[in-house]
């Protein structure tokens, strides 16, 4: 199995620990992981701002980096979804289609492909799971509260395998955190208020950590927590699943 | 409603957010409605099948509109209903005005109709000396307050009961400081009773028009549409042309979905069928295009015409809940309004498709499965291509795209300024960083993952 690690630009630049944890976790599970070193960004910041027509360069670069792998695994639901839905190339559309079918968000890869049923991980804390919208409603890694269908959650299924970890319930299980890419600056007032309310929900239920399969949401929530000088920390789900503590 | 302030959604939303407790109250009120909708939906195991069925029926309608509209017209005429066609808002208003002036009527009672809001009928008639009273309680409250509705189903959801008490005290003579909803409702009821008994003309909207029978159905919880229509000598019904459904048997699908999605009720208190005028009275129906045929021709946005105006997308939308209906500066607010409005005026409403995080909850609650968030994304592409985005944003995006297309540039930009935030605060023409207003910036790590990985590889070799 040839697996490529896709580390989105903002994870590469701001949250290398999450990418390292992803790599180590996959290796622990026996996967040989390649990291194509010329990767940059999926192009989502431009596309979601209405500039999809400027993403050709990014798309072609992405195709060059990731063609030929069996699976492409990414620790970000949002970027994974963008590739799945919007990777196109006028010159090499066949390759784009192939890649769109092979890209996986980390937790769905662990559950659906590797079929992980136990983990050597320990994280003795109260953790709130933030469902990112793109992971949830785009990739459907968890059941959505709006739909009438049986409940499931791939990240929660994995977190349940972690020793000592207690998932706290939330009042609004899948309300958006308000990051929204460029929305966070264009609509600063609403975006911040949405983030503050999400953070409050986790804090009110006693979370010591907020985790998610999407660091973009966590980056937003972390900004608010740090402004509030809160003790609550954010942590990517890969860092928990890769964590072993004797505390 | 037109944007009298000239402000965009982010500016109006920022104004709304100055009063945080009010935002919390607004958010919680609408979330409560959303939760009621969830309970109602989850009681029906066949809910998702119902949504799919409704969506397919509407798909059929949109593919065969011409046929169904002609069938409806022929059947309505057979029933003795007069059918009028209006190409746009102006023509709709003129038709209504002529019907009234031909009969020498200068006072009309009107039940809820978002189409008349879209056409600005009340203002038009007022300018022509015709007094209109809205008979839906929520509509009446905002009318007295001199405001447009802020929600298509709950027009005065932005008003607290104390504020409504003040409005009623000023306009309807209720006691000062009275805020008991029961007493206020009774005050409105007494006032409207007089209106119903004295108006010779009533205007209603149309929820569903049945091609097979030429009848139309109006859903209200207050029975006010019936009161107006039954007592007046002339009943005018305003209808967007997408309101057609093929057969009477399809009504059951929509009636089951509509109110569960809107308020969590199993069905509206009154689902009234209108088919033939009573003897000596008249029913007129005005079928309005007003941009709908243009939207029908836009393949990516055609599905927006499936909308049955339940408002579920607004209740679930975190942006709507936290920015208020008026921040959308259009008759139909929220996610659905944001995909309908740019069709009417792309320049004026260029901000609205961006007033979303694309979280997708709107598409999930939509009872006719409109892919709302995908259409918001698609509108963004159209708006930028048509040149309605700020030049500063375009310049920033070009620089960003250029950097991110080159691994070398990306790595050096990353080292210099941690690439994402170097370009993030665009689209705002001031030097303040909007991120920093309520949030700390992420801490830049010593090295990127790429740098760490290269070192690890060196170590391995």
Image (cartoon, coloured by chain):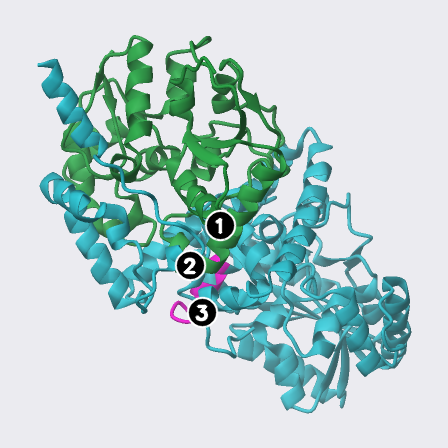
Chain colours: A green, B cyan
B342 magenta-colored: yes
The residues bearing labels 2 and 1 have C-alpha atoms spaced at a distance of 38 Å
Q: Position of residue A137 (x, y in %)?
A: 48, 36
Instruction: Determine whether the residue tagged by mark 3 lies in a helix, strand or loop.
Output: loop
Residue at 70% x, 48% y is B33
What crowding class fits label 2: few (fewer than 14 Cα within 10 Å), some (14-19), or many (20 or more)?
Answer: some
Check disc 3 and report the residue beneath it.
Answer: B8
| Nearer to us in this view, B334 or B227 | B334
B151 lies above or below A127: below
Residue at 55% x, 28% y is A143
The residues bearing labels 2 and 3 have C-alpha atoms spaced at a distance of 19 Å
| Nearer to us in this view, B170 or A230 | A230
Q: Chain of mark 2?
A: B
Q: Are marks 2 and 3 on the same chain?
A: yes
The residues bearing labels 3 and 1 have C-alpha atoms spaced at a distance of 26 Å
Instruction: Determine whether the residue tagged by mark 1 lies in a helix, strand or loop.
Output: helix
Check disc 2 and report the residue beneath it.
Answer: B437
């Amino acid at each position: 199995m040839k697996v490529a690690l896709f580390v989105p630009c903002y994870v590469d630049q701001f949250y290398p620990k999450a990418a390292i944890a992803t790599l180590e976790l996959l290796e622990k599970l026996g996967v040989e992981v390649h990291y194509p070193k010329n990767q940059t960004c999926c192009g989502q910041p431009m596309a979601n701002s209405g500039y999809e027509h400027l993403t050709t360069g990014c798309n072609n670069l992405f195709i060059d980096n990731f063609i030929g792998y069996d699976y492409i695994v990414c620790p970000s639901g949002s970027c994974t979804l963008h590739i799945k839905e919007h990777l196109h190339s006028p010159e090499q559309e066949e390759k784009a289609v192939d890649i769109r079918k092979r890209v996986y968000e980390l937790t769905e890869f662990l559950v659906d492909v590797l079929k992980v049923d136990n983990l050597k991980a320990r994280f003795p804390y109260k953790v709130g799971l933030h469902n990112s919208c793109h992971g949830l409603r785009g990739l459907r890694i968890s059941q959505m509260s709006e739909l009438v269908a049986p409940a499931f959650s791939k990240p929660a299924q994995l977190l349940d395998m972690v020793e000592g970890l207690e998932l706290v319930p939330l009042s609004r299980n899948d309300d958006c955190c308000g990051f929204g890419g460029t929305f966070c600056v264009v609509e600063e007032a609403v975006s911040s208020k949405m983030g503050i309310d999400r953070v409050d929900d986790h804090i009110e239920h006693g979370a010591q950590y907020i985790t998610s399969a999407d660091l973009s949401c966590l980056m937003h929530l972390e900004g608010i927590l740090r402004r509030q000088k809160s003790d609550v920390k954010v942590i990517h789900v890969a860092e928990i699943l890769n964590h072993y503590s004797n505390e | 409603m037109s944007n009298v302030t000239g402000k965009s959604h982010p500016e109006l939303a920022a104004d709304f957010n100055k009063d945080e407790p009010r935002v919390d109250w607004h958010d919680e009120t609408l979330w409560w409605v959303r939760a009621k909708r969830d309970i109602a939906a989850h009681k029906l195991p066949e809910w998702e099948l119902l949504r799919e069925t409704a969506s397919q029926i509407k798909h059929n309608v949109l593919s065969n509109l011409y046929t169904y509209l002609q069938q409806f017209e022929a059947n309505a005429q057979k029933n003795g209903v007069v059918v009028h066609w209006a190409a746009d808002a102006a023509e709709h208003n003129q038709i209504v005005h002529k019907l009234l002036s031909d009969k020498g009527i200068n006072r009309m009672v009107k039940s809820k109709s978002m189409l008349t809001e879209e056409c600005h009928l009340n203002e038009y008639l007022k300018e022509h000396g015709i007094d209109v009273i809205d008979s839906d309680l929520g509509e009446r409250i905002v009318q007295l307050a001199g405001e447009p509705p802020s929600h298509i189903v709950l027009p005065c959801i932005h008003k607290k009961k104390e504020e409504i008490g003040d409005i009623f005290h000023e306009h309807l003579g209720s006691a000062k400081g009275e805020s008991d909803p029961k007493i206020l409702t009774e005050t409105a009821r007494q006032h409207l009773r007089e209106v119903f008994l004295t108006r010779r003309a009533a205007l209603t909207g149309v929820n569903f028009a049945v091609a097979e029978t030429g009848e139309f159905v109006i859903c209200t919880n207050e029975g006010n549409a019936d009161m107006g229509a039954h007592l007046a000598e002339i009943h005018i019904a305003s209808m967007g042309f997408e309101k057609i459904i093929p057969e009477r048997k399809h009504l059951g699908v929509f009636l089951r979905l509509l109110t569960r999605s809107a308020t969590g009720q199993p069905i509206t208190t009154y689902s009234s069928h209108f088919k033939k005028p009573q003897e000596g009275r008249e029913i007129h129906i005005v079928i309005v295009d007003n941009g709908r045929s243009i939207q029908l021709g836009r393949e990516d946005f055609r599905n927006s015409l499936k909308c049955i105006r339940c408002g579920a997308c607004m209740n679930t939308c975190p942006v709507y809940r936290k920015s208020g209906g008026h921040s959308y500066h259009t008759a139909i607010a929220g996610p659905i309004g944001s995909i309908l409005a740019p069709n009417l005026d792309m320049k004026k409403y260029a901000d609205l498709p961006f007033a979303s995080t694309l979280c997708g909850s709107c598409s999930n609650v939509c009872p006719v499965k409109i892919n709302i968030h995908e259409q918001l994304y698609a509108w963004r592409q159209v708006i930028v291509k048509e040149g309605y985005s700020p030049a500063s944003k375009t310049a920033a995006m070009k620089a960003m795209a250029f950097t991110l297309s080159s691994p070398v540039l990306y790595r050096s930009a990353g080292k210099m300024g941690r690439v994402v935030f170097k370009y993030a605060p665009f689209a705002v023409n001031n030097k303040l960083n909007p991120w920093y207003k309520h949030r700390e910036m992420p801490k830049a790590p010593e090295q990127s993952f790429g740098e760490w990985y290269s070192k690890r590889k060196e170590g391995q070799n």
